Image: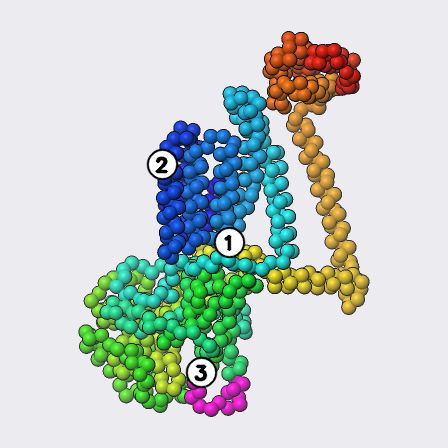
Amino acid sequence: MLAAFGACAASGELGPLLLLLFPLSLVGAHFFGARVAGKAEWAWTVFLAGALLFFAFAVFTGQLDIVLAAARFSSLLCLHRLWHRKGERDEMLLLLLSLLLLCAGAALSAELLFGVGFLGYSIAATWALALTHLRFEIEAGRGPEGSAALLQSRRLATPALLGALAALSLLGMVGSAIVFFTFPRVTIGGLRRPSTGEPVAGLGDQIDLKRHGIIADDPRVVLRVRLTPQPPTSRVNIGLHWRARALPKWTGQGWRADNAGVTPVGHLVARPELAKPSRAQAHNRLQSMLLADIEAVAGFSDGVILTPPGWPLQVEFSRPLSARGAPQRLYHNSSGDLFYVPAEVGDLRYLVTVDQNEPPIEQLRGRGRQYPASVRGDLELPQTLDPRLKALSDRLTRGRDPVDAAVEVERYLSTTFAYTRDLPGEQDDPIAFFLFERKQGHCELFSSAMVMLLRSAGIPARNVTGFYGGRRTDAGYFAVRAGDAHSWVEVYLPGAGFISFDPTPAADRGSVQEGLWPRLVLFWDAIQQRWRVFVVDYDLLSQTQLLKRAAALFSEAGRRLSGKGGGGAAFQAAWAKAIGAGVGLSLVAFFFMRRRRGQRRASRGPTLGQDERRAVKLWRQVRGRLARAGVAVNDATTPREAAARALIAGPAAAAAVAELANTCLAARWGGAALPPQAARALLRKLDTTLRPGRARATCAPS
C-alpha cells in the first residue's frame, strides 16, 4: 500500500493533507484498526459521497482535472478500507484499491520516482497477496488461536519464501518489459492534462524588487539542451542567455509583462537587413546558424519557449508518435515572446533555430532616433523619477549615438557596482537606492537601472528575463538550472530591432553551485532523462530505430565472424575469448552454487534416516485418507490434533489414528524403528475403521 501511494504521490499533486494523512493512517490502522473496524460506517459513507460530489463539481467547473480528482478519491477509498478490514474479502479489496492507486500514479506522473514505486509495489503486492491468502487458510484450519502462534513463529514468511515470491514478480516484470519494448506502441492520450506547475524565477510575468532575504541558488534542472554545432569540449559552462520574456511595464516596485494577448505564429520573420550582405557575409550567416534541441522539464516553463542568443528563425515541436489531436502550436505577443499551447503536464521537447550573426557596432551607429509607435511603452518613465538618476543618465549618454550610449551604460554598471544575492527589502525607490546608496545588488537591479538610465536619455529599452548558463553533464547535454535565472536588457535601434545588453558583471551571472548536492541533482536528472527517453517517450519510431540498430549490430557481427571487410581474424579471436570467459564464469558460478548448497545442508543438520523418511511419508498418507473421509486436516495439523478430530469418524477410527500418530512420532523424533510391514498393517487397520467392511489394498511406504 505504501509503495502504491508513493508511486501516486511522486507527482507532487495530491496535496499536503493526503501526504500527511496517508502514512499516519497506515500506522494507526495497524495498531488500532481492529477497534475501529465496523464502527460508524454511515459516517464514512456520507464522507465519501460528499467527497465524490465535491470532486465531480470541481471537475465540472474546471477547477480540477479529472485525472487528479480520480487519484485523490482513490486515496480516500484506500484510507476508508484501511480502517475497516474484517476478513479476507476486505484485505483483497484493499489490494485491488492499491492497484487503482498505482494506476492513478501512472496517469499523474510517469517519471522515475513512479518507476521506483512501481517496482516496489510489484514485489510487495506479490508478498501481500500470497501471505494474506496463506494467513486466512491457516486460520480456517486451525482457528484464530492456533494459527497465531504459527504465524508469529516466522516459520512461514521465511527469507526463502519471500525471495521466491520476489523472483516471481521480477520474472513477470521481465515478461512485461519484453512485451513493452516489442509490441507496437502508439500513445493514445485520451485525457489531456493541463500543466499545473508554477513558473520559476526567470519565467514569471513580473519582477518584484521589494523582496527581502537571499536569492536561492536552486540546483534543479529547468532545461536540457543539446547544441549543433557542439561547443568546444573544454567549456564546462557554455554561458548562454536563454531568453524567456520581456517585462516592459514599470509598476513602481518592479516590472510586469504586457499581457495584451497572443496571436498564432505562421512563420517567424527573418532578421532585418541593415545592409545588403556580400557573398562572404551571406556565407558567414549560414555558418552562424545554431540549432538548440531543448527539453523543457515539467513544472517549470509552463508554456514559455526559451531561445538561445540570436534571432529565432524556426521552432519545431518534437513528441512521441501519438494518436492525439493537434500538437502544440506556437504563439507570440507584441514583445516578441514565444509561447506554446496547450501547456501539458510532462517534459516538452522542441528545436529552436537561431541566427547568431549579430550586426557589428559600426552598422548599428547612425540609425537615428525615429522610433515607431510600437515601442512607446519602452520609453515610459515613473513620474517620481529620482533627479540624480536623470543627471547620471545625462553624464553617461549625452552626445553619444544610442548604441554607444547603451554600451557606455552597460560598461559603467558592470564595472562600478558589486553583485550580491542579498535582497535589500522594500525601498521607496529601489533603483535609486541601488545606484546611490547601497551600490550592490542582484541582476534585476542591474538591468532595471540600465533600463531607467536609457529611457531617461530617450532610448527605448526593456527588461528581459530568462536564464544564463548551461552546465555540461556526463549524459551528453547541457543543464540549465533554476539558479541560473537571470535578467538583462534589450535596447531598440531603428532598423535593427531589439539588441541585447547585459550590465551584470560577467563573473556573477547564473548559478555558481559546484558542490556535492548540485552534482547529485545533475546525476539524478540524467537518470530521469534516460528513463523518459527509454520508457515514457518510447514509441513506434523508437522501436523502429532500436530494431535497425540491433539488425545492424548482428549484421556487423556476422560480417566480422565470417572474416569479411577486414579485422575478421582479430574479431574471431576476441569472440572466442569472450565465449571462453563466459564458459569459465559459468563453471565458477556452478561450483559456487554447489558449495553454497552443501553449506546449507550442513547448517540444517544431518539428513533424515530411512525410518524417519518412512514416518513422514506414512503420516502424509494418513492425512490424505482422513481428508477423503471428511476429517478436516491440513499440513499444519499436528498428529495429536488429527487423532482428536478423527472422533467424528468413530472411536475405532480415532484409536487407529492415535496409534498411527504415536508410531510416526516415535519413528520421526524418538529413533524408533518403522519397518514397511508395520506401516502397511497400520494403514490397513485405518482403512477398515474409516470404511467398515470395505478394506482395500493399500500401498504403504517401503
How far apart are labels 2 and 1 at the CA level? 35 Å
Residue 261, given in percent of the width and then of the height, sits at 35, 72
Q: Secondary structure at mark 1?
A: loop
Residue 508, given in percent of the width and then of the height, sits at 37, 67
- In front: mark 2 or mark 1? 2
Verify whether residue 324 appears in magenta.
no
- In front: mark 1 or mark 3? 1
The correct choice, above or below, for 436 with respect to 685 in the image is: below
Residue type (three-letter) at the residue carrying disc 1? Ala
Mark with earlier residue (1, 3): 1
Q: Mark 2 sits on what residue? A: 43
Structural crowding at the residue carrying mark 1, measured as other residues with C-alpha within 10 Å and reported as few (<14), some (14–19) or many (≥20): many
Mark with earlier residue (2, 1): 2
- In front: mark 3 or mark 2? 2
Q: Secondary structure at mark 2?
A: helix
The correct choice, above or below, for 12 with respect to 636 in the image is: below
632 and 588: which is toward the camera: 632
Q: Mark 1 sits on what residue? A: 110
Quadrant in the rendering for residue 363: bottom left
Residue type (three-letter) at the residue carrying disc 3? Arg
Mark with earlier residue (3, 2): 2
95 and 490: which is toward the camera: 95
Quadrant in the rendering for residue 44: top left
Per the rendering, the mark at residue 413 is: none
How far apart are labels 1 and 3 at the CA level? 40 Å
Tell me which residue sits at (64%, 10%) in the image: 650
The correct choice, above or below, for 82 with respect to 497 in the image is: above
Structural crowding at the residue carrying mark 2, measured as other residues with C-alpha within 10 Å and reported as few (<14), some (14–19) or many (≥20): few
Residue 241, given in percent of the width and then of the height, sits at 42, 71
Verify whether residue 278 appears in magenta.
yes
